Image (cartoon, coloured by chain):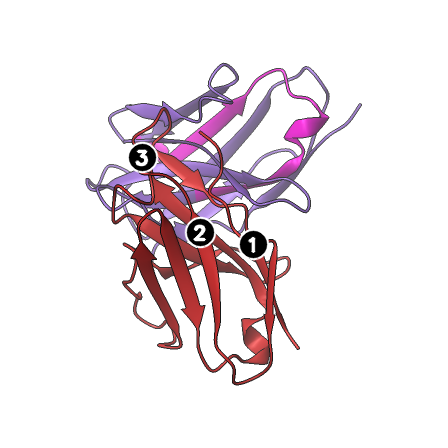
Amino acid sequence: QSALTQPASVSGSPGQSITISCTGTRSDVGGYDFVSWYQQHPGKVPKLIISEVSNRPSGVSNRFSGSKSGNTASLTISGLQAEDEADYHCASYTSSNTPLVFGTGTKVTVL
Amino acid sequence: QVQLQESGPGLVKPSETLSLTCTVSGASITSGGVYWSWIRQRPGEGLEWIGYIYYIGSGYYNPSLKSQVAISVDPSKNQFSLRLTSVTAADTAVYYCARVKLGFHFFDYWGQGTHVTVTS
């Protein structure tokens, strides 16, 4: 099972919106609504920000939103802020030979 | 509030066995509806799922590590553990323990992570 594909980096100016993609297959992202997203600041622990494609846990800013189309899930950060500069990882349930797989990770830079 | 804390040696010699323990507080490790998982992150890389276990002992592992890995549960101590055998430099990483919601497949609580270096 290969890692889900994410862009290595995405950047944007404060106040802008950016979108991070997470591409898999019909065996994972495309087949199930079990995509989750994690934010990880440098040297810190990953934090769940989106579960089940688009559910936002309590306490997570509504500037974060998730969606899915076909085999690609997306995380959108609206009203980009300096504190959003971090690494973002997607993960999905998969019906292949491993039940869980992470994405390759995306570094978000706020210009 | 659920909390997880990893413990174990920070240095392991090549070909030896890496052993880590995760102590859970704020929840019983025998409570249903969750798996207990290990994840690692090599320097400068993304997250890699290692495996997870249900409290009654049903474990699932990443096929790329399956021959090296064993995860076990100790309900009496509210802990679960990772054993990774025959380690090499490629196993140098930050190791996290985390909780997985059964049926929903997301990691909702994480430990702080422990850095393990494989070196002679």
* Chain in purple in the render: B
Q: Is residue B44 above or below residue A57?
A: above
Task: Mark 2: give few (<14), some (14-19) or many (20+) Cα within 10 Å.
Answer: many
Q: Is residue A11 left or right of residue B31?
A: right
Residue B82 included in the magenta stretch of the image: yes
Can residue B107 be seen by looking at this rendering?
no
* Amino acid at the residue labelled 3: Ser
Of the residues under marks 2 and 3, which one precedes in the sequence? 2
Residue A66, x across and y down, in percent: 34, 63
Which of marks 1 and 2 precedes in the sequence?
Answer: 1
- Queried whether the magenta region covers residue A81, the answer comes back as no
Q: Which residues are magenta?
A: B75-97
Please name the residue shown 46% across and 56% down the image: A21
Which element type, helix, strand or loop, lies under badge 3?
loop
Q: Amino acid type of disc 2?
A: Cys
Q: Secondary structure at mark 2?
A: strand
Write down the residue under mark 2.
Answer: A22
Q: Amino acid at mark 1?
A: Pro
- Who is closer to the viewer here, A32 or B93? A32
